[in-house]
Amino acid sequence: MIQFTVYGEPAAKGRPRAAMGADGRIRGAYTPGKTRVEETNFRAQAVRVKPERPFEGPVVLEVVFFRGVPRSWSERKKERALSGGILPAVRPDTDNLVKLVKDALNGVFWRDDAQVVKLTAEKRYSDTPRTEVKIEEVENA
C-alpha cells in the first residue's frame, strides 16, 4: 500500500474546452490551463512515493479531501466543522475532485485509471487544506 498527502486546497478537474477554427468549426478539445497546472502540482507532490513502475493489476483508491474552513465563519461554526459536525456539501463536486487525482496519477501509479476497481472519497474541513491518498494494488482471484 502507498499513502501520501498533497498539501494545498483540493482542486477539481475542469471541463474540457473546445478549440474553434477560423471557419467556426470545432478543431479539437483541450484541458484548461488551470487544470493542467493543478494536475502537474498534484503529480509533483505525489511522485515522491511512486512505485518503481505503475501497478499492472486492479487498484483500490481511497481519497480524503480536506478543504479550508471559510474565514467568514464564527469560531463556534468553525469548531463544529473541524470536528466533523459540518461537512462541505458545496462545490466542487467530489467526483470532479477525484477526476483530477486520477488523471494526475495516471501512468505514474497505475497504467490506466480503468484499473481502479474500488474507490472511496470524502470531503471534510481542516485548518490545513490537503488531499490524503491511499493506493493499494489487489490480486485478481
Image (spheres, helix red, strand yellow):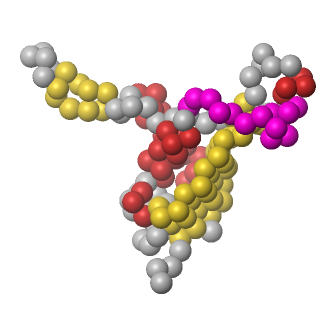
Report whether residue 40 is seen. Answer: no
Q: 128 left or right of 23?
A: right
- Residue 125 image point, x, y percent: 74, 36
- Residue 92 image point, x, y percent: 56, 31
The residue sitting at 62% across, 68% down in the picture is: 1
Q: 90 left or right of 128?
A: left
- Range shown magenta: 79-92
The residue sitting at 17% across, 26% down in the picture is: 26
The residue sitting at 84% across, 28% down in the picture is: 78
User: Of all residues shown, which one is farthest toward the bottom?
Assistant: 141
Image quadrant in which you'd find residue 107: bottom left
The residue sitting at 59% across, 55% down in the picture is: 120
57 or 95: which is nearer to us?
95
Residue 41 belongs to the span the image colors magenta? no
41 or 141: which is nearer to us?
141
Report whether residue 133 is seen. Answer: yes
- Residue 44 image point, x, y percent: 54, 45
Q: Is residue 104 above or below residue 15?
A: below
